[in-house]
Every structure is written in structure tokens, then in C-alpha cells.
Amino acid sequence: MFSITQEIDCYITCITGSDLLPLIGIEAFLALVFFTFYLKAGKPVFRLTSFIAGQLFMVLLIGTVISAMQCSQMLTIEIYTAYAVLSTTIVMLLPKVYYKILIRKYSAQPITEIVDWPQVFVNDLIEGAKVYYYDSAVPAAFASGKVIFLSMGMLELMDEKELKAVIAHEAWHIRYNNRTPLLRQLSFMTFTKNHSKDELELLADAFAGKVVSESAVKSARAKLN
């Protein structure tokens, strides 16, 4: 019969008596250091890098703790292993099909049906990306897979330069969308809240500012706020 008390006792006994105890201490210390850097860092790229490093050391810490265990058939380890495998599979595979679900959900159509330049603009930023529009008065833009979705409300609200800034922002997300599932999965595996969203948005804005202009990014943001 499963007993959480017995499993906790087993963790304490195995860890304190393990040759891996110094390594466990080092990994825990480095994870704490990098999470502290994350809280103290000012630049988005430093914050994001510190957060990822902290999560990686947390994953290493969990793996080392599991390696130190001598008790057989520990239910908590079996549950965690199943959780890690299942969540990794879902997180890594979902982006490959989710954009197709969104196209059907929003009845989205290629942007070239109404205007050509957004697709031409994206072609210069990232190979293979497509721009779709959908019928909604609410101004919105987002990326999934290799597709950028723009609402009719967004197309009507923004002038051409502002819209280029919005598209460049989403193109940045497509460039690095292979990293986003990894960040999400690290958070799942370490049970830490995914704090990467704000940093990713700031980095995408910085990219749009270089490609178009910082004034266009600020103007687009002002219209959406």
C-alpha cells in the first residue's frame, strides 16, 4: 500500500547516505543562483537565459535525486516519469498540428486573397512562413507553427508601417517557436511557472524595431493598449 510518509523517509535516507549528495547540493545551489539572476537581471535576454539555466539545473537535480534512490517501485518516481514522458510528447507534437486546427476554427484564409504585400514582407523575414487573415473585429495577431494569423480588426486598425511591425514581431516568434515548447516543458518538469512570455515579447518587439522601426512598434502597441 502506498504511503507518502514511507516514500519521504526513503528520499531522506537515500539522499543523505548517497555519494551523490555533494552533486545534489551543487545543482540545487546553481539552480537557486540562476533563478536569483533572473529576478535581478534587467535585460530580457539575460532574464530569459538565467531562467532557462535555472530550470535546466532543476531538471538535473531531479534526475540526480532519482539516481540516488535505492528503494524499489517508488510510486512518486513512477508517476513523475509518466508525467514527464506524456507532457513532453504533447508539448512537442501539438505545435506541429495546432495551426491547422486554428485555420479551421477561425475559417482563416491566405492574406493574398485581399492584399499581397504582407506575404511578400514575411517571405523576406522567414522562409516558408504564411500569413492568414480571419474575420473578427477584435484587433489580434498571433503565430502558430509557421503561420501568422491577423484579424480583420488588426488590418483595419494599423497603417502599413505599424502592420509591418506587428508581422515582424510574429515572424520572430516563428523563428524561435521551436524553443517555446522547450521552455514550456522545462516549466512542467520543474513545476515552476513559465516566466518566459514577457521576455519573449520584449525580444520580439526589439526584432520588429530593427526590421521596421521602434516608432512603428510603439505606435502599434499604443493602438492596442
Image: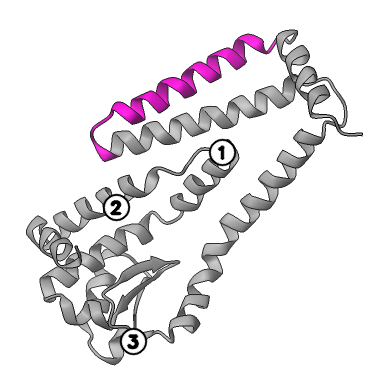
Name the disc covering residue 135, or none.
3
- Which residues lie in the magenta part? 19-44
Q: Where 27 falls versus 117 (above or below)?
A: above
For disc 2, the marked residue is 201
Q: Residue 140: horizontal and vertical position, in percent?
A: 30, 72
Q: Residue 11: horizontal and vertical position, in percent?
A: 75, 20
In the rendered structure, the answer to whether residue 44 lies left or right of residue 77 reads left
Earlier in the chain: of badge 1 and badge 2, it is 1
- Residue 48 picture quarter: top left
Name the secondary structure under disc 2: helix
Q: Quadrant of the C terminus?
A: bottom left
Q: Residue at x 48, y 24 (%)?
A: 31
- Of residue 132 and residue 198, the one placed in the foreground of this image is 198
Q: Residue at x 51, y 32 (%)?
A: 56
Q: Where 145 falls versus 14 (above or below)?
A: below
Name the disc covering residue 191, or none.
1
Spatial distance from mark 1 to mark 2, Cα to Cα? 22 Å
Name the secondary structure under disc 3: loop
Q: Residue at x 20, y 51 (%)?
A: 206
Name the disc covering residue 127, or none.
none
- Of residue 26 and residue 4, the one placed in the foreground of this image is 4
Number of the front mark, 1 or 2: 1
